[in-house]
Image (cartoon, helix red, strand yellow):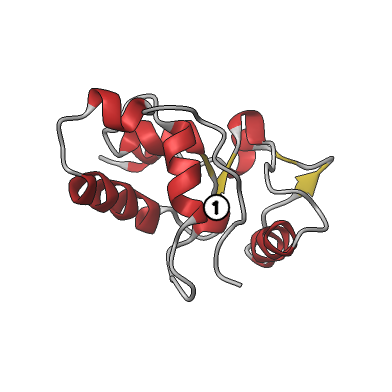
Amino acid sequence: MGKPEREAKSGGKDAATRHSPASQDERLNALYSVLAQIPCGRVISYGQLAQLAGLGRAARWVGRTLSQLPEGSTLPWHRVIAAGGRLSLPAGSPSGDEQRARLAAEGVLIHNQRVDMRRHGWHPTEHNS
């Protein structure tokens, strides 16, 4: 298992393709570049990841793209969660269980299917000097 199993629920073009003149490869490279920087023990929301990658309001596109990562990808997809710290992958599903296990191994505390974003959220602008 190396990726989350999620259904794409978005109809039509999403924010990443509607508002960005960049090619699909450029969007993917921007997304993967930011994703690779998320440190161990930190999490980020789909929407925050889209914003940092310069993709605007493309949270659903980010989720769908992460669900399609190739098997064996080393990108830390498990560090991306829903808004408000909610874990969107269902507990009991293979990907949901893998995400929870990986986060726990990194010291991320999960309580009532949520992560405390104040404690574990990644805010790269706060760490840049």
The relative height of residue 96 versus residue 8 in the rendered view (above or below) is below
The one of 30 and 122 positioned closer to us in this rendering: 30
- Residue 41 in view in this figure: no
Q: Name the foreground residue: 90 vs 6.
A: 6
Can you give x and y, in whole percent of width and height, for residue 67 in the image? 52, 54
Q: What crowding class fits label 1: few (fewer than 14 Cα within 10 Å), some (14-19), or many (20 or more)?
A: many
What residue appears at the point 69 percent right and 36 percent down from the top-left corner? 86
Residue 20 higher or lower than 32, as above or below: above
Q: How many marks?
A: 1
* Residue named by callout 1: 79
In what element is the residue under mark 1? Answer: helix
Which residue occupies 72% across, 58% down?
A: 100
Residue beneath the point at 48% across and 76% down: 72
Q: Residue at x 18, y 47 (%)?
A: 26
Which residue is at the front of the view, 9 or 90? 9
Q: Position of residue 14 (x, y in %)?
A: 38, 28
Q: Label 1 is placed on what type of residue?
A: Arg
Q: Position of residue 22 (x, y in %)?
A: 16, 37
